[in-house]
Image (cartoon, rainbow, N blue to C red):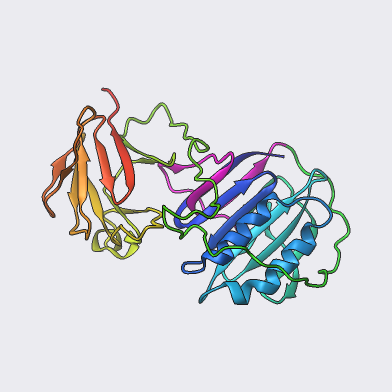
Amino acid sequence: MPDRCEVLPGDAVVARRGGGLLWVDAPGSPALVSALHACLGVTGPGADRVLAAVAGQVSSLASGGVSFALVLSNDAGTGVALWAGKGQPAVDGVPVSGSSVDGGTLATGFALGRSLYVGPGQSAPGTPPGVSYDLVEGTVPGGGATLHLSAAAPAAAAPVQAPAQSSFSTGTDAGFGAGRGASAARPDSGEQTAFWRPDPSEAAPILRFDDGMVVTIDEDLVLGRRPDNHEMVASGSARAVPIADTQNVLSSAHAALTRSGREVSLVDLGSLNGTHVAGPEATEWTQLEPGVAHPLSDGDRLLLGWTVITFEQPQE
């Protein structure tokens, strides 16, 4: 079984449960996301038939272009995978080969090796400095994930042909895009399943998100739903930190963090719903004036949309 799961930063979704690992980028397709997420609990000889059934329903469940990579593993050290669009699983850096089926590509009976990657492309890119997950179980925002196995898996079983498709239906359209009040079952939030081990030699301040993600403030940052196109990021003067936003309350570039020596300041970038801050003991939030830098102190809390972030300044 895998002993460590590194999640790359991004505004898509990474989920892990049991022996299953999923990366999916399907905005506007909550029914497809729910169907893929439900597959994470599937194991045993029938797993390939379940994935084939899901593949047959991709076109009807998806709205627009979608990308995903889903791998289910078993105790024998072999896996079953389904992927589409930009999604691509890879074992030890080698892309998994499969058979084309309606809705994607299906592979069965392949060895899991020492590392398993799911995400866009054919191999895992390097994790940017200062951002790291170790996902035990749950669902978190991410741009891909790599499972590191504690030991090499046994030799692969003989590949089998993709099974005939059968019908598959999802009982709800509720998924990662469902509202907070939705009564339908939703995936685990991933809270308390991710942790970060900092390098003791580093003394940079950090942002600790309410979902477990930790971001090191080793340079200026731009936070938001899709901050990659902001001028600070495009010019190379800041790093983008995308935040998952299922409620559509964040602006594309919502706020920035700027450094001046040890001092870190928070700046609202003209966001639609505002950027708020509160001290460690404060009982009310203060909304920042757009464009005006607000110096942060250790323990300050930041509110961007529904996302609560704690600023931590290491002691000198």
Q: Residue at x 28, y 60 (%)?
A: 251
Q: Which residue is located at x 87 percent, y 54 percent?
A: 157
Task: List the single residue furthest toward the right.
Answer: 158
Is residue 137 magenta-colored? yes
Q: Tell me which corner region of the image, top left, top right, bottom left or bottom right, holds residue 76.
A: top right
Q: Taking the image as drawn, is residue 227 in sight?
A: yes
Report the span colored magenta: 123-150
Q: Between 226 and 193, which is closer to the camera in this rendering?
A: 193
Relative horizontal placement of residue 230, taking residue 65 as reference (left or right): left
Task: Verify whether residue 294 appears in magenta.
Answer: no
Q: Is residue 204 above or below residue 268?
A: above
Residue at the spot x=14%, y=48% of the render?
Answer: 288
User: Closer to the camera, 34 or 93?
Assistant: 34
Q: Residue at x 13, y 46 (%)?
A: 293
Question: Which quadrant of the rendered structure holds the N terminus?
Answer: top right
Classify residue 51 by image quadrant: bottom right
Residue lying at the far top in this picture: please name it: 316
Q: Count how many numbered circles sit on residues in the image.
A: 0
Residue 207 to residue 291: above or below: above
- x then y, percent, for residue 256: 24, 51
Q: Residue furthest front?
A: 183
Image coordinates for residue 178, horizontal then vertical, percent = 46, 59
266 sits left or right of 13 in the view: left
